Image: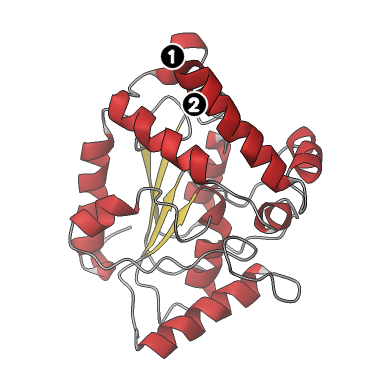
């Protein structure tokens, strides 16, 4: 969401890549200009790269709700983007479901979202591991212990810090507004990583991305939910991503 929240970027940095992570519109201190459209954001990121002297990026990475923004950047500025990596990402299908959209508009609207996140942080302090496990289970279609499979103490600490620092600003309300995602115009190779038991972004999104992106490869994680970094097979997936990024763009996909 906002640039200050680590969400899997450390695996790219550990492999030696430089990471540029602008906040998405409405999150952090990034304003929500005009209509806050994906196209306008993609153009703003391109302008940022131009300002920094970045003529080409190895990949644009879309994580979770950042999927549509990454796809739009790749589609709109193919001369900038060599590859596309999508991790537990929202794709071209309607998202979220109607119940979640209506609920989100109530508890995450500006002026209320700060109270909502404060309540979550309080629940984590009071409820400890039980509260954290309830949050993790909320983004998994698995049940009981299966929803927490593979999540060790280090993962719990990472998730506790993540949930403890989250804020929605005006960004999440904007994310709830449907906007077409142009997969057909993407010409760069794409690597899609998703879990079949993702309860936050349904696996059907990954399947739709694999079907609609012209040069896509789908990697199925064994993670028990949305957080694919909390899975025994994540090191192998990280190596797969690294190989994808290192391969000549014309030989992947």
Give the percent coordinates (x, y) of residue 242: 22, 54
Q: Nearer the viewer, residue 173 or 219?
A: 173
Give the percent coordinates (x, y) of residue 52: 37, 86
Crowding near pointer 1: few (<14 within 10 Å), some, many (20+)? some
Residue 140 visible, this angle:
no
Residue hosting label 2: 197
Q: Which mark is residue 213?
A: none
Say whether residue 183 is left or right of residue 179.
left
Give the percent coordinates (x, y) of residue 183: 56, 61
Residue 104 visible, this angle:
yes
With respect to residue 40, does 225 lie above or below? Answer: above
Residue hosting label 1: 146
Based on the displayed image, in which of its 4 quarters is residue 189 positioned? Answer: bottom left
The residue shown at (26%, 27%) is 232
Give the percent coordinates (x, y) of residue 207: 51, 41
- Distance from Cα at disc 1 to Cα at disc 2: 10 Å
With respect to residue 208, does 26 lie above or below? Answer: below
């Amino acid at each position: 969401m906002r640039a200050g929240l680590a969400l899997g970027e450390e695996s790219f940095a550990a492999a030696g890549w430089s990471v540029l992570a602008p906040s998405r519109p409405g999150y952090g201190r990034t304003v929500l200009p005009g209509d806050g459209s994906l196209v306008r954001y993609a153009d703003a990121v391109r302008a940022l790269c131009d300002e920094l002297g970045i003529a080409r990026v190895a990949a644009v990475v879309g994580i979770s709700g950042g999927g549509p923004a990454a796809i739009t950047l790749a589609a709109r500025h193919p001369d900038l983007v060599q590859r596309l990596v999508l991790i537990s990402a929202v794709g071209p299908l309607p998202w979220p479901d109607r119940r979640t959209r209506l609920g989100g508009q109530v508890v995450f609207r500006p002026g209320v979202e700060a109270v909502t996140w404060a309540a979550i942080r309080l629940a984590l302090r009071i409820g400890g591991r039980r509260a954290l496990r309830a949050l993790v289970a909320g983004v998994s279609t698995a049940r009981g212990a299966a929803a927490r499979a593979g999540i060790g103490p280090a993962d719990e600490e990472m998730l506790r810090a993540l949930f403890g620092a989250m804020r929605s600003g005006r960004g999440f309300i904007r994310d709830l507004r449907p906007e077409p995602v142009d997969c057909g115009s993407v010409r760069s190779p794409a690597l899609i990583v998703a879990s079949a038991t993702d309860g936050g972004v349904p696996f059907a999104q990954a399947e739709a991305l694999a079907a609609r992106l012209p040069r896509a490869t789908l990697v199925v994680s064994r993670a028990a939910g949305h957080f694919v970094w909390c899975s025994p097979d994540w090191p192998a997936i990280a190596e797969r991503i690294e190989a994808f990024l290192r391969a000549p763009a014309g030989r992947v996909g």
